Amino acid sequence: MERQVKRQYDTSRRRAAAQATRQAILDAARRLFIERGYAATTMAELAERASVAVDTVYTVAGRKPALFLQLVESAISGTDDAVPAAERDYVREMRAEPDAARKLRRYARAVREMHARLAPLLLVARAGPPEVAEVWQSIARRRAGNMRLLAADLAATGQLRDGLDLEEVADVMWATNSPEFYCLLVEDRSWPPERFERWLADGWCRLLLA
């Protein structure tokens, strides 16, 4: 019994150490990408900032595009790891909510919280090479698919405006929930994030609901 407990303890300790190393690498990557830019950040500098060997960076987190993708996924989920859309708390809350306006207001809050984390990475992507642009575009394509699911969920309430098809609803949501749109108003025009959230929810309700 003692051997089993010790084995479990050692396994838990190794797992915790591996997670701490991974987080140190991701934290260092985020800081360096934002401070210096993606192209100017070398893996050697990243390893030094994280206090690990360069080989450890590659083993634990992969090459720079993989690192950037992990940072984006973490910013989207608000956790240390990627979380599928259907498993995020706010998505579950929205699906359980029968009222379309309350669904949209809950989503506006999620968008505001998410983009506060994503905005600095958008600036990195704008100045980055094609490999970074492809990461960003893949996330945008995935978001478009999720908006089609949301449009269907809104339609199921029977509260959409007459004459709107699901593709139009999805496209409107996709355009206005983008990190680029958030940055235009919050970063460029200095809107408080809370104002952006209220405006976004009100705009969706006026544009989409009867």
Image: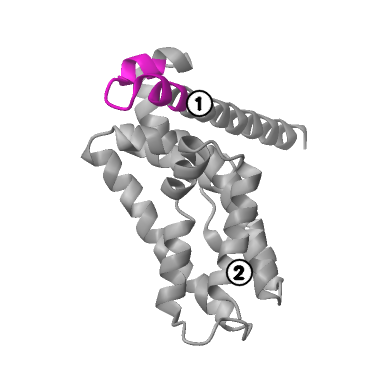
Mark nearer the N terminus (1 vs 2): 1
> Does 11 sit above or below residue 36?
below
- The residue under label 1 is 27
- Which quadrant, please, contains the C terminus? bottom right
Q: Is residue 53 visible?
A: no
Q: Amino acid at mark 2?
A: Cys
- The x, y position of residue 185, in whole percent, is 49, 44
- The x, y position of residue 116, in whole percent, is 56, 39
Q: Amino acid at mark 1?
A: Asp
Q: CA distance from mark 1 to mark 2?
A: 38 Å
- Which quadrant, please, contains the N terminus? top right
**Helix, strand or loop at disc 2?**
helix
For disc 2, the neighbor class at 10 Å (few under 14, some 14 to 19, many from 20) is some
Of 86 and 185, which appears nearest the observer?
A: 185
Horizontally, residue 13 falls left or right of residue 139, namely right
Which residue is at 65% across, 74% downward?
100
Magenta stretch holds residue 33:
yes
Horizontally, residue 76 falls left or right of residue 139, namely right
Magenta span of residues = 30-47
- The residue under label 2 is 205
Task: Check the image and tell me how it is coloured.
Answer: one colour
Of 48 and 34, which appears nearest the observer?
A: 34
> Does 129 sit above or below residue 98?
above
Magenta part mainly helix, strand or loop?
A: helix
Q: Is residue 197 visible?
A: yes
Magenta stretch holds residue 34:
yes
Of 165 and 129, which appears nearest the observer?
A: 165
